[in-house]
Image: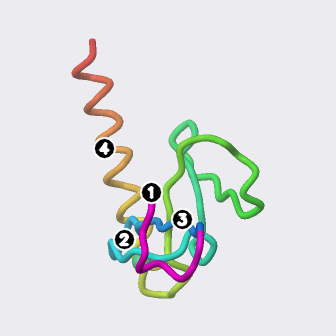
Amino acid sequence: MPNKNSKAGHQAIRTCVVCKKKSVQTTLMSFFLLDGGVVFDLARKCQTRKHYLCPQQECVELFPKWLKRQRTKAFLAMGAAQ
Ligand SMILES: [Zn+2]
């Protein structure tokens, strides 16, 4: 998508799940959820759908709360599908 205001080239912008701030993908920690657990894809090798988290204390501290909400949602979604 062309953007003449962008000086950064093709840097993907992602949103932190905790603070909702947008940052360049490479400055965020990427992770995905697997079997009710969380896997950090620090090597960025996994091609699955990922979430992103700022590597700052505030977001890292609130991350477990976010994680808890995700599990609840996943559980409810499964229940609704049956
Ligand atoms: Zn954040």
**Residue that badge 1 annotates:** 1
Of all residues, the one furthest to the left in this rendering is: 80
Q: Is residue 34 magenta?
A: no
**Residue that badge 3 annotates:** 12
For this view, does 66 lie left or right of residue 52? Answer: left
Q: Residues within 10 Å of mark 2 (few under 14, many from 20)?
A: some
Q: Amino acid at mark 3?
A: Ala
Give the main secondary structure of the magenta stretch: loop
Q: Residue at x 41, y 57 (%)?
A: 67
Tell me the SS state at disc 2. Answer: loop
Q: Nearer the viewer, mark 1 or mark 2?
A: 1
Give the mark nearer the N terminus: 3 vs 1. 1
Q: CA distance from mark 4 to mark 1?
A: 35 Å
The quarter holding residue 42 reads bottom right
Q: Quadrant of the N terminus?
A: bottom left
Of all residues, the one furthest to the top in this rendering is: 82
Q: Amino acid at mark 2?
A: Val
Q: Are marks 4 and 1 in contact (CB under 8 Å)?
A: no
Q: CA distance from mark 4 to mark 2?
A: 16 Å
Q: CA distance from mark 3 to mark 1?
A: 11 Å
Q: Nearer the viewer, mark 3 or mark 4?
A: 3
**Residue that badge 2 annotates:** 18
State yes or no: Cβ of the residue under disc 2 lies below 8 Å from any atom of ligand 1: yes
Give the mark nearer the N terminus: 4 vs 2. 2
**Residue that badge 4 annotates:** 72
Q: Nearer the viewer, mark 4 or mark 2?
A: 2
Q: CA distance from mark 3 to mark 4?
A: 29 Å
Which stretch is magenta?
1-9
Q: Nearer the viewer, residue 40 or 15?
A: 15
Q: Residue at x 36, y 77 (%)?
A: 21
Tell me the SS state at disc 3. Answer: loop
The image shows residue 30, relative to residue 28, as above or below, that is above
